[in-house]
Amino acid sequence: MEYKDYYKILGVPKDVSKEDLKKAYRKLARKYHPDVSKEANAEAKFKEVGEAYEALKDPQKRAQYDQFGSNYQNGQSFTPPPGWGQQGGAGAGNFSSFFENMFGGGGMGGGQDNFYAQGEDVNTKITISLEDAFSGAKKTIRRPSGSKQTGTLNVKIPAGITAGKKIRLSGQGMAGMGNNPGDLFLEIAIAPHAHYRLEDKDIYLDLPLAPWEAALGAKVTVPTLAGKINLKIPSGAKSGQKMRLKGRGLPSKEAGDQFVVLQIMTPPADSDKAKQLYQQMAEELNFNPRETLENL
């Protein structure tokens, strides 16, 4: 029978690592997959690279192949030793006679059709708004290259999803033999917001305050992703102080919180009246913001 050079078929050196072997196989499997390849001999090449990978991915098979096939060249006649191949189990039926005589047709537990039945999973990212992460949404996305079909997909974004989580779309991955495709995994990314900051399930909002609101206390309107609320600012509030709105973060079994971070804003002294008021404050309030630094 004709000897098959599995290393040459996969385009890898004989000392190829397990990881590089896997990468080479996946690249060629995508190239020659009958459902996506336009090459005339795609199905035959697809089976050939699959057979080569099956022989080399298993350390025991690879050692046997290297030992008994080291003196042969691709295309030359190969005759296995007496009794060779009997340890492999039942014949696969869909591999070449070289493979079946070399390994006894075993190792697949049901043949090449079973080995190729499941298509590869496809992983991609989808970026959504913070509002969509909070409320949930329905999105239409373009199918990634290499997935089961072309066109678009309708995706349901669950409320409360966080960045890094994955949505699994069963059967929407790379096409497989026997109409058994892999899955499509969408990894969630959440776009930055103009006003809110997201930390895990908690939402942060900087709230500007006038000096008199911070000093005297006030009731102000604060936006949240669930709607506006009234918030009581305590007298003597300081810039950077956080106020917690329980359960106003991303929804879940244990919902996140919203933290309002107070930011005291200084009115501009851009008129004679404003300058006069600042001068009056300086004279009457006897306020020294650097008092604690005087003894340093």
Image: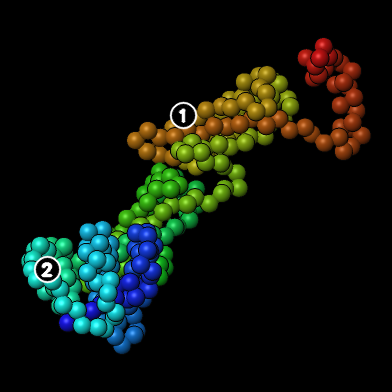
Pointer 2 with pointer 1, Cβ within 8 A:
no
Say what amino acid the circle numbered 1 marks: Lys
Quadrant where the image shows the C terminus:
top right
The numbered disc on residue 111 is none
Quadrant where the image shows the N terminus:
bottom left
Q: Which residue is mark 1?
A: 246
Mark 1, residues whose alpha carbon is within 10 Å: few (<14), some, or many (≥20)? few
Q: Position of residue 180 (x, y in %)?
A: 22, 67
- What colouring style does the render use? rainbow
The numbered disc on residue 84 is 2
- Which residue does the image show at 43% across and 52% down from the upper left? 188
Nearer the N terminus, badge 2 or badge 1? 2
Task: Give the answer, above or below, for where 226 lies relative to 103.
Answer: above
Q: Nearer the viewer, residue 223 or 39?
A: 39
Residue 231, can we see it? yes
Q: Position of residue 69 (x, y in %)?
A: 24, 72
- Which residue does the image show at 90% across and 28% down from the upper left? 276
Q: Position of residue 86 (x, y in %)?
A: 8, 66
Between marks 2 and 1 in the image, the one whose residue lies nearer the viewer = 2
Label 2: state its secondary structure: loop
Say what amino acid the circle numbered 2 marks: Trp
